[in-house]
Amino acid sequence: MQKDVLQSIVSPDVARVLALLPQAWFVASIEGKVVGKSDSLDTFGLIVLDQVEEEQTLALISKAHESKTALDEEIVVAATRTHPEQTLRLRVSPMNHFHALVLIEDFTEERRLDKVRRDFVANISHELKTPVGALALLAEAIQAGADDPEMVQHFSARMKSEADRLAELIASIIDLSRIQDSDVLQSTEEVEVDELVTQALDDVQLLAKDKDIEIVVGGTGNLKLWGNRQQLVSALRNLVLNAIHYSPKGNRVAIGTALLDGHVEISVVDQGIGVPQHEQERIFERFYRVDPARSRVTGGTGLGLAIVKNVCQGHGGTCSVWSEPGHGSTFTMRIPERNTAIAETNVILGDSA
Ligand code: ADP
C-alpha cells in the first residue's frame, strides 16, 4: 500500500534513482507519515511504525514545506533505548504539496573523531606549555647568574632534564598518533612472545637496577601472536616502566605470559602503590594521572597507558587492570593469537609487497 502512495508521488524514473541512492532516505507527509523508505533506514531509529517520531526531523520537514525550498541541516539525535547518540545530516526536499524527500547521512563517527582531535590538540598544547615555560625560566636564571659558574652548572643541568622531558613527550605524542593511524594493519608479522618480552625489558633494565628492582619472567613459553612487533614492544615496555616507576625501591616486578581461549595474555605485576578503584578506568585516558605531582617526578608523560590501550585495541584485544592501593597492580594485555582481520589484511598486503 505504501508503495502505491509512493508511486503516485514520484515518477518511475525518480523511483529508480531513489532505489540506487547510496544513503538512507524516506518520503514522508508533512505530518510525518512515511510512504516510502530505503532498506537501510531502520538503523537510525528516526521512524517508528511508519511514522517519523524524531522532533527535529519533523520540524525540518515542516520548515521545508513552508519555505518551499530544500533544506540541509545537521542534527544530533539523543540516545534512545535502542540507539546511541547520533549525528545525522538531513537534506529535506519538498516533493509536492504534502510530501518531502529526506536524505540521511550518518556523521556520528566523523564528529566523534573531530572532537577527539580537538581535545587532543588542546591537551597537547597544555602539556607542552609546562616544560617550555620551565626552559624559558631556566634560561633567564642562567643569564642572571652568568658570572656564577656553580649556578650556571645547576640551572643548565635542569635545562637538560626539562629538554629531555620535552623530547620524551613529543616522542610519545608521535607514537600515539602513529598507532591511532592504524599502522598496525600495514606491518604485521608473526611475533614470538618470549622475544617481545626480552625486547621490552632491554630498555628498562637500567632503570630497574637504579631502583634495585628485580624483574622476573614466567608463564607459558614459546607463544606466538600475529601483530605489529614495534607497537607491541612499546606497549609492554610502557607497562613495565610504570610498574617500576610506581613501586618503592627494592621491590619485585613480574611478567607472566599465558594462552587463554585463543588469546595471548601478557601480565605485568607489581607490588607498588596501586590505583584506587574509581581511577582505574580513567588512567587509560590521554594525559590522565592519578597524582600529577608524582608523575612529574617519575618523568611520566601521561600517555603510556593510552598507547597501551590503543595498541591492544588495534590488535583486536584489550588491556585491563586489577589493583589495590598499597598492595600493587596487575596490568594485562589480552591479544588474539591470530586476529583474522589483521591476518587477512596482511595476506593481501604481503602478497603484493
Ligand atoms: P604516566 O606517564 O603518568 O605514568 P600513564 O598513562 O602511563 O602515564 O599512566 C597514567 C597514570 O596511571 C599514572 O600517572 C599513574 O597515576 C597510574 N599508573 C599507571 N601504572 C601504574 C602502576 N603500575 N601502579 C600505580 N599507578 C599506575
Image: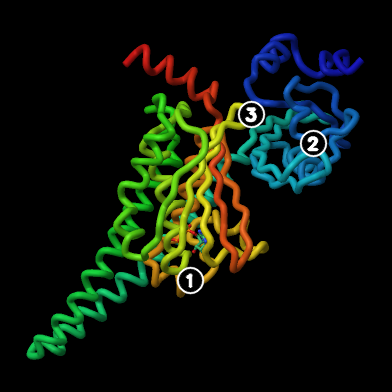
- For label 2, count other residues whose C-alpha is less than 10 Å away and answer few (under 14), some (14-19) or many (20+): some
Of residue 11 and residue 281, the one placed in the foreground of this image is: 281
Q: How is the image coloured?
A: rainbow
Tell me the amino acid under the disc marked 1.
Pro
Viewer-proximal residue among 217 and 147: 217
Indicate left or right for 294 with 76 as reference: left
Does the closest atom of ligand 1 sit within 8 Å of the Cβ of label 1? Answer: yes
Q: CA distance from mark 3 to mark 1?
A: 38 Å
Task: Determine the residue positioned at 68% across, 30% down.
Answer: 103
Residue 109 screen position, x and y as percent: 59, 40
Q: Is disc 3 in contact with disc 1, using a CB cutoff of under 8 Å?
A: no
Q: Which residue is mark 1?
A: 292
Q: Residues within 10 Å of mark 3 (few under 14, many from 20)?
A: few
Quarter of the image where one finds residue 197 = top left
Residue 258 is tagged as none
Looking at marks 2 and 1 on the same chain, the residue that comes earlier in the sequence is marked by 2
Residue 17: percent from the left, percent from the top?
66, 14
Quadrant where the N terminus lies?
A: top right
Q: Secondary structure at mark 2?
A: loop
The residue under label 2 is 46
Q: Are marks 3 and 2 in contact (CB under 8 Å)?
A: no
Query: Which residue is at 79% across, 26% downward?
Result: 27
Task: Confirm or reject: label 3 Cβ below 8 Å from ligand 1.
Answer: no
Mark nearer the viewer, 3 or 2: 3
Closer-to-camera residue (49/320): 320
First in sequence: mark 3 or mark 2? 2
Cα separation between marks 2 and 1: 45 Å
Residue 261, which numbered label? 3
Three-letter amino acid code at disc 3?
Asp
Q: Is residue 184 above or below residue 40?
A: below
| Element type where label 1 sits in the image | helix
Q: Quadrant of the C terminus?
A: top left
